[in-house]
Image (cartoon, coloured by chain):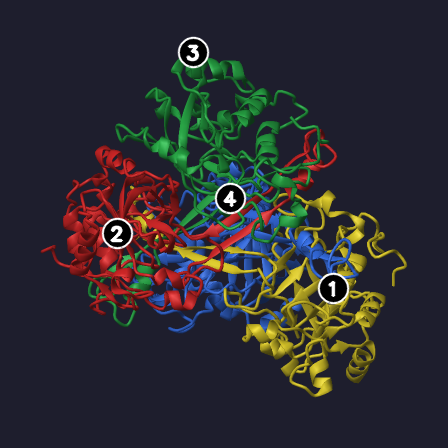
Chain colours: A red, B green, C yellow, D blue
Amino acid sequence: MSDLPATEVGPSRYGAGDERGAFNEATPEVAVRAARLVRSGRVFDLSHVIDRSIPAFPGRTFKQVLSTTAHQLNRRRPDAGRRGWGENDVNWIVEQVEATQQMGTHVDALNHLQVGNQVYNGWTIDEIVEEHGTNRLGVDTLPQLVTRGVLVDVAKFKGVRHLAAGEVIEPGCVEEILDCHGVRVRPGDVLLFHTGWGGLWSDADAYLSGEPGPGMAMVEWLVESRVSLVGCDTWSFGPVPAENPARPFEVPQTLNVRHGIVVAENLYLGELADAAVTDFMFVLSHARLRGATGAWVAPLAIV
Amino acid sequence: MSDLPATEVGPSRYGAGDERGAFNEATPEVAVRAARLVRSGRVFDLSHVIDRSIPAFPGRTFKQVLSTTAHQLNRRRPDAGRRGWGENDVNWIVEQVEATQQMGTHVDALNHLQVGNQVYNGWTIDEIVEEHGTNRLGVDTLPQLVTRGVLVDVAKFKGVRHLAAGEVIEPGCVEEILDCHGVRVRPGDVLLFHTGWGGLWSDADAYLSGEPGPGMAMVEWLVESRVSLVGCDTWSFGPVPAENPARPFEVPQTLNVRHGIVVAENLYLGELADAAVTDFMFVLSHARLRGATGAWVAPLAIV
Amino acid sequence: MSDLPATEVGPSRYGAGDERGAFNEATPEVAVRAARLVRSGRVFDLSHVIDRSIPAFPGRTFKQVLSTTAHQLNRRRPDAGRRGWGENDVNWIVEQVEATQQMGTHVDALNHLQVGNQVYNGWTIDEIVEEHGTNRLGVDTLPQLVTRGVLVDVAKFKGVRHLAAGEVIEPGCVEEILDCHGVRVRPGDVLLFHTGWGGLWSDADAYLSGEPGPGMAMVEWLVESRVSLVGCDTWSFGPVPAENPARPFEVPQTLNVRHGIVVAENLYLGELADAAVTDFMFVLSHARLRGATGAWVAPLAIV
Amino acid sequence: MSDLPATEVGPSRYGAGDERGAFNEATPEVAVRAARLVRSGRVFDLSHVIDRSIPAFPGRTFKQVLSTTAHQLNRRRPDAGRRGWGENDVNWIVEQVEATQQMGTHVDALNHLQVGNQVYNGWTIDEIVEEHGTNRLGVDTLPQLVTRGVLVDVAKFKGVRHLAAGEVIEPGCVEEILDCHGVRVRPGDVLLFHTGWGGLWSDADAYLSGEPGPGMAMVEWLVESRVSLVGCDTWSFGPVPAENPARPFEVPQTLNVRHGIVVAENLYLGELADAAVTDFMFVLSHARLRGATGAWVAPLAIV
């Protein structure tokens, strides 16, 4: 897919200065067609709840602390009520969160992964790093996404509860599943792979012990299909251990850095798979933290 | 609207044990009708970018720190490449965020505001408080929202750049605007009020000096209309200073605690108002931080 | 020791408005005498290293993230050198820490513990709570401490590696140990109890499973002795389970709230005990975080 | 002082693998002599209180949030009292802090500053960086310091409230001051420079606008004098703007990286200077955060 040496990242198909990557594929026409898929109005929330106990990549943590001190402060205001501020006794509580966006159900930004020192479109880390994040390709530069989603239920196809760690999802299998459903992938589509691995979510050690996922042949297939986003019910995207153990995380790295396709991780796809939904309106909106490497999200499948 | 004494919160219209509030109004039928409003496929992002410089309620802060140390660590792995991990030289960067969810464009959860010691449906703070958040009514219990949005452009109607701080939006005015557009509010609708105040966003002192907003008469109107959510281009919802200065923040307090209607704050409505959009498919999805008092969001208006 | 009902905290022996507690006992004269104990110049560091793996009270965590981004930023300055800022290629790195001061080797402040709603000298939580901490009795109001330290090696006296969880240290035992060493406790002294429990430090589960410590009779003894501070090689101070299981943490609560005697926790006393040191110059200095409930410290024993 | 090219850091005088730097100079003998300086028992706290309003280097912040939720949790325990846990109604409060150690009165560790990519003793950032901090030269590897402190009151000598920003303290001036007091600097001494700049502490903009300090000639003098630590009542150490504007922060960089002499910053020296103290017992103890680049401290001068 690239004749450039391993550490050279060439210009993107979306232009040398592009910061939107494959989200460019999700045109207004794509959004219009997606909205037409809404028939019953059922909304599937593809996210897990986030708290300190969820599975996390080594070194990543989530901490949340609640503060109710406004209750004391409001009762000490000059115009305090008996039980709060004012005659209406208003009070509030506030949490403080300390965490990386690389936790729970989240979408990666185009700055998260690198080949050596280079990110998408060839910028180097040295060029884009700031104290708070990056000055390019942060999640704030990623558009909001309204498009068609397609569920590829590999676990069901293979008749297993979940694929095995390191098991590779190949294009042949995916094509067979899509044919079976009469779905033809179009530019701008989001492809979500149900491997069943997400069923291990509540057992962090098992969940993090590895993962199945699309392999390098699927990368080529996805790029040619011009999808706008991919996602999986796993903590990364692509098999772990990798197809070639000497090339770790090459699937998301290649998608993200060389092709501008970001991935959504830790998706909750069980309910969608149980409902045997194949294609749907897909909406992914994210808070725009300047320069962040991702965003906690709740992607929606609307049918 | 309530004959109960100021500090007694009665059971909700949605049931005594309900934790979804007015989001109950957003039924599947409502979602189906909303999707039919998508004609051009244009997606309006109603959020502001979040960084440490944005306007914030006193004491609330946003801090983000980037870490690129994986670059060093990956090059020291036993199977490291020359510039990263593996032959594919993979690397990554990660930010760490420290902030409350009560920052930037966010949706409040039903646990955020109280009358004295009571939240929605009469639970007391003493009952629901945990170290990390609350065990009821956290933002994780709030469903994802797909419904119709209605923009009420009060600034345009009044012919001003922005309403004044403390200026009250009254039902008569809102009805006139809606009549003008031929829009009739239905159960489950989201009402967004464009006051123009959001144009002050980049001047934090001015933005935080007060705000215009719907008054207590509008609260009654909104409750009777059975809206699912309300929002404004201001840092809270409702006039500041309040209509009755002895009753601060009574508008969002009454909506949230007594009627289960949460508010979306710090909305970016300028572009939507400029486009003269009146009604649209509205999608609000939020990451589900367990027990948190809100969530940073990017609400979408799709037309 | 107190005839007041359980929830009433009377005025302190140091005055009704006092915020220094038993640190008042550490007079300049006491410091002068302490300095005379320095003969060999050996300095014992009584602290453990703090990192995310250390034993912690449920819900408390320590997180530290390193940022090296100044390296990139410095090389992009207009007057950058080839490898840093300026011709001298200066660079720096900075960590970000997220933690409570109630971790690792730390000293509690007089605001940390309460009887019901009351802290030392009878102030209520409602009076002193602010968003950031307390407006009275924060660790910033605690003086720096230079006095004599006395090591009471209970483990050695009992001939055990460590006392058992819940084992109570009684005055008779302490007096016998002191007699044996010819040490008579004087006002302003710091008493450090070596139980051997600190030897479990590297096994967090074992360390946190309980602890031995001075019981309620010792509390009375310590108050009468007018010590300035007490400490132990355990995560709290006093036996866990408590002597009277219906009265948890009554030892530190009584010392702190009723008598103004704060405690130093998680002390590393192994080396001092091995050296058979009995009395020494004791210096405890702490960063003064406004309103905080304690401070990470490295108390020193200088002989 | 070094014939090596600007970016090569040679082995330290304390040995190629040393991680203690000039703290090696503070021998037990030095501590014994220091203790003999204690005559009145007065303890000077050389630290400022830390809160979110203190002067900070660009991008560095201090945030502290108080949580009182244990009050609610304790009253909900099965064995709760009426107002807390147990018959003794015990309760507690806890803060959560988010900050770098590079704030307020702090001591730098030997890993904080670099020449290009190299720290003290020639290790490179690439070798020592971990996610949490560094695996060498973190503040946890710095011993606790008990030695003699010498106050050099340059402001008094020059008859000014404070020296000017960028004003250079030269060896001749320092020698004259020391001669005047009959103090001869000995190996292991700590030299604290009172410039009066600390009087601007409460005006963050003024305080951060620059600073006076020892220049490069003083660096050589300090190294030859074999001091164990230096400090100033300024936010860094050394004149800002620098003597040679093309060589920013060269004074602390040279001391730290090439000579293993760390600096204490933001010292509060006003009271010590007012008391006209010239030499004293100096104790600097710091919490040992693994791999951190410094530590908040309260250095003590005991006379």
- Is there CB contact under 8 Å for labels 2 and 4? no
Please give the name of the residue rendered at 66% of the width and 82% of the height, measured from the top-left corner: C162
Q: Which residue is outermost to the left?
A: A3
Q: Is residue D144 left or right of residue A163?
A: right
Residue B132 vertical placement versus C255 (above, below)? above
Tell me the kind of residue under disc 4.
Answer: Thr
Badge 2 and badge 4 both on one subunit: no
Badge 3 and badge 2 both on one subunit: no
> CA gap, disc 3 to disc 2?
57 Å
In the picture of the structure, the residue carrying the numbered disc 2 is C82
Badge 2 and badge 1 both on one subunit: yes
Q: What element carries label 1?
A: helix
Discs 3/2, front:
3
Tell me the kind of residue under disc 1.
Answer: Pro
In the rendered image, residue D5, in percent from the top left (x then y), is placed at 27, 60
Discs 1/4, front:
4
In the rendered image, residue D119, in percent from the top left (x then y), is placed at 37, 62
